[in-house]
Amino acid sequence: MPNMQDDFCSDNSVDNSADDAVIQDIITNIDRLIEEFKISHDVDDIRTISQNEFTGILKYIQFNYIRPTKCLYKYTPNTIHNNNITLMYNDYIVSSICDYYMYLCSIYNKIVNVYGFYALTGIDFKTFESWEEMQSQRPQAFQTIKRLKKEYECTLENGAQSGKNPVGFIATLNHRFGWSADNKPSLTVNITRSKNEILSSINPELLSDNS
């Protein structure tokens, strides 16, 4: 399988081993907190809960791990100059956690969207918007938000084709992406990635603890 990071890192010679360890730790804690939430809130199957309740789980992870540990930051706030908050985030780590967020949505049958990724990470919408204007300066951040929006469109399309409230899905597609009955784009984005595929795309050695 090709390395998902190859599309986003302009310099593949960079040693990301330290970041890979952080990513592994984040994924482990996300899984831990999901199980913790299920027990404390008496949830048997996340696939059966609503999108809003799933967002609540993502916020639970943010409040109890992502935010207090500052695990997505490349620099601490005290090292930032000119109040440029976009420099706070490690684009490599954020991109990988975005992949894992989309994987969770796929296995739990939930819609991928920017708000859900905000709920998980706490990255504000102003920062997301700035990434869309930084293709040359921060290509990995640019590709992360671009990929996130494309996956949003794809999961809406999958929802429309599932037969469950297709009118609602189509209405959202038309409003958000300009779809219409006579002009429906054909999407081929595959959002189903296993946990091992995500980890192996970062560093195959990470699989040793997850096999």
Image: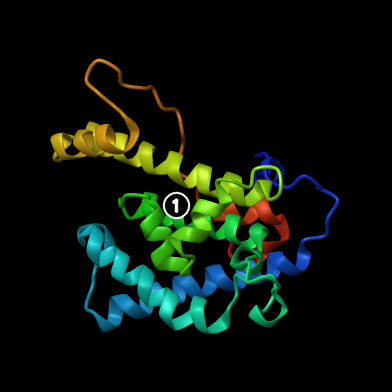
Quick one: quadrant of the C terminus?
bottom right
Q: Which residue is mark 1?
A: 102
Compared to residue 128, the image places residue 29 above or below, namely below
Residue 98 seen in this snapshot:
yes
Please identify the quarter of the rendering in which residue 85 is found.
bottom right
User: Which picture quadrant has residue 196?
Assistant: bottom right
Q: In front here: 142 or 46?
A: 142
Q: Within the image, what quadrant is residue 172 found in?
A: top left
The answer to whether residue 151 is left or right of residue 183 is: right
Name the residue: 34% across, 33% down: 177
Tell me the amino acid under the disc marked 1: Met
Quarter occupied by the N terminus: top right
Q: Position of residue 162 (x, y in %)?
A: 22, 36
Q: Where residue 175 sits in the image (x, y, percent)?
A: 26, 36
Q: Secondary structure at mark 1?
A: helix
How many marks the image carries: the answer is: 1
Q: Image check: 12 left or right of 191?
A: right
Image location (x, y in percent) of residue 13: 86, 50
For the question of whether residue 162 can be seen, the reply is no
| Nearer to us in this view, 121 or 30 | 121
